[in-house]
Amino acid sequence: MLYQHLKARGIHDPLVLDAMVKVPREQFVPPELVHYAHDDRPLPIGHNQTISQPYIVATMAELARLTPESEVLDIGTGCGYMAAVLASIARQVCTLERIPDLAEMAARNVEALGIKNVVVGVSDGNLGWPENRKFDAIIVSCAAKQVPEKLLEQLKPGGRMIVPVAHGTSHQILTSYCKKDDGKIEFTEHMPVKFVPMV
């Protein structure tokens, strides 16, 4: 049902569709919300944070144009659901969460599913991955007023960053940034979204 629902809404990348089916969302939500796990909507996970709706997760993953060789940086780990979906496609996912309790929850969730290619870090996502490495794709699961320069620096030539950009207090647009071989950045706006703010 999820496969058909996402496909009907325009998700066509078979790697993304397979990942969305493979990763059980019910493993990432609080026990009292498990019966809502397959609803296409965000759900609270504590600390005023949410797990994104499946359609938005799939859209962000598809816009990133991942391959099995991709190395991905995921900003705003939350419960680890996005990281798990990305890890089902990519070679490695490094994910950053600023709230230690959520980072620990995410690490437990991905470990419980036997996912071995996710590294969870606790840090300010605005600063990027501490080792200053480069990534093929960067996914930001919180709304930024402006795109952190440090994240653009960590994007490889040809890489893509997918981020909700806040325009004012209530208007957010899901935006993709592509770094060209000469280092120039091009961006495309895609759709209105609603994410928690980047802190």
Image (spheres, rainbow, N blue to C red):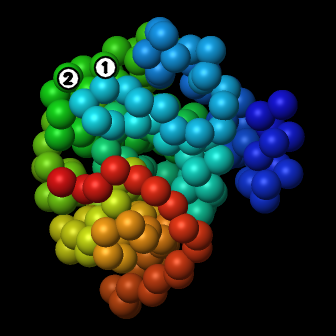
Q: Residues within 10 Å of mark 2 (few under 14, many from 20)?
A: some
Question: Identity of the amino acid at label 2?
Answer: Asp
5 sits left or right of 90 in the view: right
Vertical order, 196 against 88 (above or below): below
Where is residue 63, by image quadrant? bottom right
How far apart are labels 1 and 2 at the CA level?
6 Å
Query: Image height check: is 30 above or below 45?
Result: above
Horizontal relation, residue 46 to residue 187: left or right: left
Secondary structure, mark 1, is helix
Q: Is residue 121 left or right of residue 43?
A: left
List the residue tagged with mark 2. Answer: 101
Residue count near mark 1 (Cα–Cα under 10 Å), binned few <14, some 14–19, many ≥20: some
What kind of element bears circle 2? Answer: helix
Q: Are marks 1 and 2 in contact (CB under 8 Å)?
A: yes
Figure quadrant of residue 22: top right
Q: Is residue 32 above or below residue 100?
A: above
Q: Specify whether 171 is left or right of 10.
A: left
State the image coordinates of residue 161 (x, y, percent, origin top left).
Answer: 42, 66
Q: Which residue is mark 1?
A: 105
Q: How many marks?
A: 2
- The residue at 25%/42% (across/down) is 96
Which residue appears at 47% of the width and 21% of the height?
28
Taking the spot 62% from the left edge, 55% from the top edge, the residue there is 59
